Amino acid sequence: MRKEESVTEQLKGTLTPDRKERKNLISLLQEIQESLGYLPREAMTELAKFLEMPAVRVYSVATFYNQFRFTSIGKYPIQVCLGTACHLRGGKLILQEFERQLGIKVGETSQDGNFSLERVACMGCCMLAPVVRIGDRAPAVKIGDKIYPKMTPFKVDEISVPYKQEIEKERSEEEQIPQ
Amino acid sequence: MTFKELTNRAKSEWEALQSSTHILVGTATCGRAAGAMETVKAFEEELKRRNIEVKVIEVGCMGLCYAEPLVAISRPESLRVVYHHMTQELVPRLVEGYIISDDPCLELALGTFEVGEEGEAPYIPELPRFEKELRLVLRRCGYIDPENINHYLANDGYRGLEKALKMRPEEIIEEIKKSGLRGRGGAGFPTGLKWEICHSYSATPKYIVCNADEGDPGAFMDRIVLESDPQQVIEGMIIGGYAIGADEGYIYIRAEYPLAVERVKVALQQAEKLGFLGDNILSSGFGFRINLATGAGAFVSGEETGLMAAIEGETSEPRPRPPYPAESGLWGKPTALNNVKTFANIHLIVERGADWFASIGTEKSKGTALFSLAGKIKDSGLTEVPMGTTIREIVYDIGDGILNDREFKAVQIGGPSGGMIPANLQDTPIDFDSLTSIGSMMGSGGFIVMDEDDCAVDATCFFVDFITRESCGKCTPCRVGNLQMLKVLENITNGKGKMEDIDFLLELAEDIKGGSLCALGGTAPNPVLTSIRYFQDEYAAHVLEKRCPAKVCTNLTAYCILQDKCDRSCEHCVLTCPTEAIGGGVGKIKHIDQEKCVNCGTCRDVCPPKYNAVVKLSPISSLPLEDFAAKEKAVAKAIEESET
């Protein structure tokens, strides 16, 4: 989220006059989350004003659906699939192993903001169960997200390595920039 | 351009492609997860490096998901060969072999589309899977570029619409009624009848809605259809719009399927560009538009009234019916809402006729059924079979049997709303009514196979947990009843159950079934009712012996290292245990600290087969006395944590 701008400023491009219809509520929420990473309170209030409805209605819809989140997401959001096929092949063990490795519980974001952990119901990749999807700086699922097939608790550490290396690389690059 | 001109142009593009060497790579989500995009890139780089001009085309999924990444190479006047597990490393070999030279690399092939020499790769249509299948909806999937409408047009696309627009709406409805097509979303309501009711109302505007909110965990039929051949769904919707008198449609796709959303978006743009959508379609005077709505992640949005509420921008809470959507649906207007696969069948029925369609399947269930095979089955993927095919044929002939040759235990058809069908009923033919009669339902097509290592109680607990999370909370039987069932089931899996709990579950299940507002609640007890009906002895073992026969329920099982089998010099388990629960030290026999063990099973996976020293036990009282005490402590702690 670009901190220097206010939420109102940031929503200008999304809340255009041609989208004032009630039916756009969910798609607007999706777009706001897409650009801000989550749904801050101010954004929902702003949206309510825009659609001329009580803020509580916006909040009610946003909290109803699993897709929406109200805290910021990690740089690399991790989604562990717990659909039926993944459950039968040990998806829960994968989730627990991520919880141990990251030191966070499902639904939380790590303190350094690098990883967040979620469980999802099914990605439709049941033949490769259990699967894990790791996104890149985006709350919504993207086509290019990496899906890791046939996971085992042992592989959890292994697949985290490139992300940790990337974080480390970015950190050292930042340090090299003279202030 | 007229329809004929459009088709001719598409056909010449298609024929030009067929008369040149080209490579098809399956890049649906399933292929991508297996590395198909890396394969595409490797082909493009290898061809560029060698300066060869050959087209690499991304197609959808052939349904053979177990074999992905899947690649097909077509060469004029040569065998067309399909290769399985074609990861990027194998690409240079294939380019060298079959693009540059004449070696079709049959050792890498799954099969060929033409009959080859004796002893070469198998002829695909004669593989046991394809002999049992009948591909109508899937017939183009994996063969055409889903982002190129000309591929669809060249393969009979939009012929149904062209014919339909010359018919009267009533004639189309009559044809669909005569065909016997029943809704493919699960309930099996006759499509023609639904359209007829919708047509009979005079209120305008009317709407066509396509339900692509495939929320059933373990089901991916709609995803594959939309990612592989989206135009057929669009064509079905346009025909539906013309038949009921609607000029607008919505297709509601869950956001968890980003590729399906993208491919449908492209398909809609292309259809509009060629005049299959918009005003005055094919100069008929009929106009129709389709909007795309993406779901925001709620299972209940798959319920028809819930789905329409979501399109309206509301919370997806179902409402009582009647009035049915055909009378009062989207924004209170007459709406025909059907599943992806229902729409995908429409153009074929119009084009080939109701009698042809009605000749496929059983007396009361016509046409084909699509199933996504997953779980403990060897050849998982998508299959399309005539209605009436038995469970056994699907598991053994199409799916090639159970993974690792374990014993077939049960199949869950219809996801969390369906039932657990035991292996001894595997000769049941699959059609709407036979499945209902044994306590299950057709559902949308999830087909999850369980083997002897799966626990019926644990699986039931999983489904009820899912429903509890996804219940919208509007009506009490579903909101509170399912939560109560979950608590009782959890108690049983924790070894705290009583025999009277089972009767209580049966009673509660009937109440939830009868008292819920929508199908989500109404079908939620199916897994409970069927698992108790068919696997009562397993419930009894959990309750009376505190034993999980399949050794799945964590609080009733424990890992143990057999002293006489453990090799002192090996450290595999010690080094890989995520909780450092294995001790004993270098050169000593290893031992699991049951208080620290989290039952992940890594030690058993890494223990070299020549020792095979790690075993799983149930009940936990079969552990050595000291370990048992430690495990009991750990279990008590785990239960306490899960309850808070």
Image (cartoon, grey):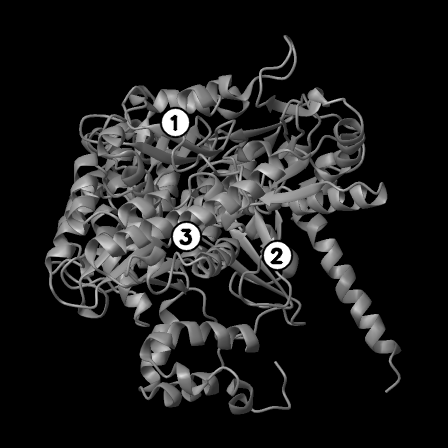
**Kind of residue indicated by mark 1:** Leu
Q: Residue at x 76, y 42 (%)?
A: B53
Q: Give the quarter of the figure containing the N terminus of chain A.
A: bottom right
Per the image, label 1 sits on a secondary structure element best described as: loop
Q: Which residue is drawn at 30% across and 63% down?
A: B287
Q: Residue at x 70, y 20 (%)?
A: B107
In the rendered image, is residue B216 in sight?
A: no
Q: Residues within 10 Å of mark 2 (few under 14, many from 20)?
A: some
The numbered dot on residue B2 is: 3
Q: Which chain carries label 3?
A: B
Residue B568: give x, y in percent of width and height. 77, 28
Contact? badges 1 and 3 (CB < 8 Å):
no
The numbered dot on residue B590 is: none
**Kind of residue indicated by mark 2:** Asp
Q: Quadrant of residue B74?
A: top right
Q: Residues within 10 Å of mark 3 (few under 14, many from 20)?
A: few
Tell me: residue B245, above or below residue B53.
below
Per the image, label 3 sits on a secondary structure element best described as: loop
Q: How crowded is mark 1: few (under 14 residues within 10 Å), some or many (20 or more)?
A: many
Disc 1: which residue: B134
Q: Mark 2 lies on which chain?
A: A
Q: Which chain carries label 1?
A: B
Contact? badges 2 and 3 (CB < 8 Å):
no
Residue B396: give x, y in percent of width and height. 43, 20
**Kind of residue indicated by mark 3:** Thr
Residue B475: give x, y in percent of width and height. 19, 62
Disc 2: which residue: A145
Residue placed most toward the observer, B111 or B320: B111
Tell me: residue B426, above or below residue B582.
above
Residue placed most toward the observer, A22 or B112: B112
Q: Quadrant of residue B354?
A: top left
Q: How many angstroms separate mark 2 from mark 3 (CA)? A: 41 Å
